[in-house]
Amino acid sequence: MKLNRTQVVGVIFLLIAAFFAAMTPSIHVIDGLYEPGPRIFPYLAEGIIAVCSIIMIIQARGKEKDPTAPESKPYLDKAGWKRLGLASALMIAYAILLTVLGFLISTPIMTLAFIFVLSSGEKVNKIAAIVITAVLTVGIYFLFTELFSIPLPSGILF
Amino acid sequence: MDAFLSSFMTSLDPLNLLLMAVCAVIGVIFGAIPGLSGGMGMTLILPLTFGMAMYNGFSMLLGMYVGGISGSFIAAVLVGIPGSASSIATCYDGYPMSQKGQTSKALALGIICSFMGTFFSVIVAMLLSGPIADLALKLGPWELFSLCFCAVVLVASLSRGNAVKGLIGAGIGLLAACVGMDPVTASLRFTFDSVYAQGGIDMVATMLGIYALLQVTADFAKGNQKLPEVKAKDLRGIGVTLRDFTSNVKTIVVSFVLGLWIGFLPGMGSGLANLVAYAQCKSISKNQEEWGTGIPQGVMASEVSNNAAIGGALIPMMSLGIPGDAPTALLLSGLIIHGMQPGPLLISSHPEFVYFTFIMVELAAIFVVVSELLTKRWFPFLLKVPYHYLYSAILVMCYVGAYTSTSSIFNVFMMVFFLFIGILFQMADIPASPMILAFILAENLESYFRKGFSYTDEGILPFFTRPVSLAFLLLAAFSVFWPVISAKMQQKKKAKV
């Protein structure tokens, strides 16, 4: 049976609820409590997610054939999924680079990458891109570290 | 009165005024550009406020809030695309007015109606917040739990018309808030032996991921990055006369009251207010057939109501600690970061802060109306900003914000994680606002619930036997089941006909 996009999400959330429900009994409960304890809210949240996900999966049955339902159209076309994959890869890459190289090295690299990728093939003024990257990096760095004394990631290599 | 005067003087501090003005202008720009919003701007500057004195930080946040909601009509009038959800209904008549050559008038109506909505709704908020907080102080943990529970369920069931999807969002918010130490006995939950997770998932990282990062990523993936060209000319002058307002008092009053009320209801805010007010004002209008063809009443209904929601949203935020919409949720988290406890005690324990907020919103509204009227002719330039530069800068700000919120790289990864949760939400059309509200209220919800058990030996019974608590629970149940009952009733009616 082929699932539509709402049903796929329903299954994912059902699995998330099941995973956390399996973890919940390991939460330590202090002896002699006069109240439901720290497991009650996780169970409540997992229960809501699980029950509602099942209802959502059932409600979305056959909706892909109903032209008025959002499920009749794909969330993204093939090119859209590729763009989403590329953007997601950049997001993860920046998080990793910030951890390893710190703000001052990773930010110019990633800002330029963002500008060129997000331009979607449109012509980018290289000088403008470099100026914006430099101003953004230096501006944010001084604003946070010097003006507000808020540290930015320095990286694990330095 | 002393507190009011002292707050008034604090709000007139030149640095506070300057920060408010700068952020109000940025807020108008964020509001004007489709895809961005004042709320997103607030999320981006929130981490910046951590290192500032509280009043300076809040001047920035409040300026951005007012500017963002006001500015959203600009793109709606100029290109027929709402700057944010708060101005969807403005497109219905604002854009046709523009096409008829009345762009200047439509923009002026948007500017002045936005001001009226904000200014008068905040006066109402100032008058009502105190009495509501006094009432709330008489409530015990049972009633407070039921009130917060009712707020979450109301948002879940009403936010996009599908209670089941709204409840999934609320469930995810509750589960995310469970990570870390529990609020009563400090037991560790779902930390997977990570020291960073012991402090819980950070609110700023969550909001940056599910709003800002998602907006940029989804826009890029869907290819929604280009705006139509603006053809408007001759935007000089004010463009409206006093008669435009005096002849439409009914539209202004009805949309104001609706906006205020919808803003007051938790989690709904201006995004819903403009649509409801437009529909309602149209239905009571004598010239219904002209609505949608470019009449001033359409712009007035939408813009008065969405800005009136600001005052409406501030009432539950100040008096109960429950955010009326996403921007007030950010204000609440700003409050918490600066060491204040939102809730019914806020007004009596920090009256100077509460008055400061109201006064600063009023000053921001005055600043925005004057500056927008003076710069109206340059509005078309706002929509020419190249998205790839703007979005790149926003992305960098997101990462900086997520990191500086708790000085932990763990938060940056959590933000990216919530980007993926946001993509799943979009795929299934699950609204994000119930998740955010549940996430914010989860700690209070849980502690009220568990305290309710500890205070008596009657277990869960007092939640149902105390009348106010029962009333909130019944309202929550009603909001979930009413769409089902009403659909069945309509089916029966149709069958009879």
Image: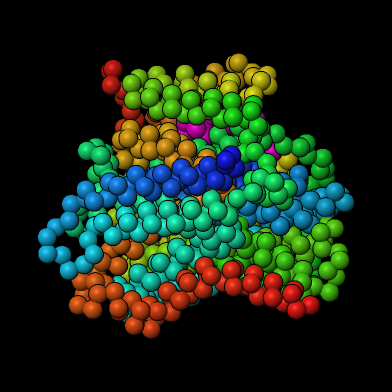
Please give the name of the residue rendered at 53% of the width and 61% of the height, measured from the top-left corner: B163
Pinpoint residue B214: horizontal percent, then vertical percent.
52, 39
Q: In this view, does B99 lie above or below B284?
A: above
Task: Decide whether residue B396 is among the magenta residues.
Answer: yes
Please give the name of the residue rendered at 71% of the width and 49% of the height, measured from the top-left corner: A66
Number of marks present in the image shown: 0
Residue A14 seen: yes
- Lateral position of residue B13 relative to residue A132, left or right: left
Displayed quadrant of residue A139 = top left
Residue B344 seen: no
Quarter placement of the C terminus of chain B: bottom right
In the foreground, B288 or B319: B288
Displayed quadrant of residue B51 = top left
In the foreground, A94 or A9: A9
Please give the name of the residue rendered at 38% of the width and 38% of the height, measured from the top-left corner: B414
Please give the name of the residue rendered at 47% of the width and 18% of the height, measured from the top-left corner: A109
Task: Decide whether residue B365 is among the magenta residues.
Answer: no
Pinpoint residue B8: horizontal percent, then vertical percent.
44, 64
Displayed quadrant of residue B193 = top left
Coloring scheme of the render?
Answer: rainbow
- Which contiguous range is marked in magenta? B383-397
Quarter placement of the N terminus of chain B: bottom left
The kind of secondary structure the magenta stretch mainly shows is helix
Pinpoint residue B54: horizontal percent, then vertical percent.
36, 52
Q: In this view, does B241 lie above or below A90?
A: below
Pinpoint residue B157: horizontal percent, then vertical percent.
53, 63
The residue sitting at the left extreme is A31
In the foreground, B340 or B147: B147
In the foreground, A58 or B180: A58
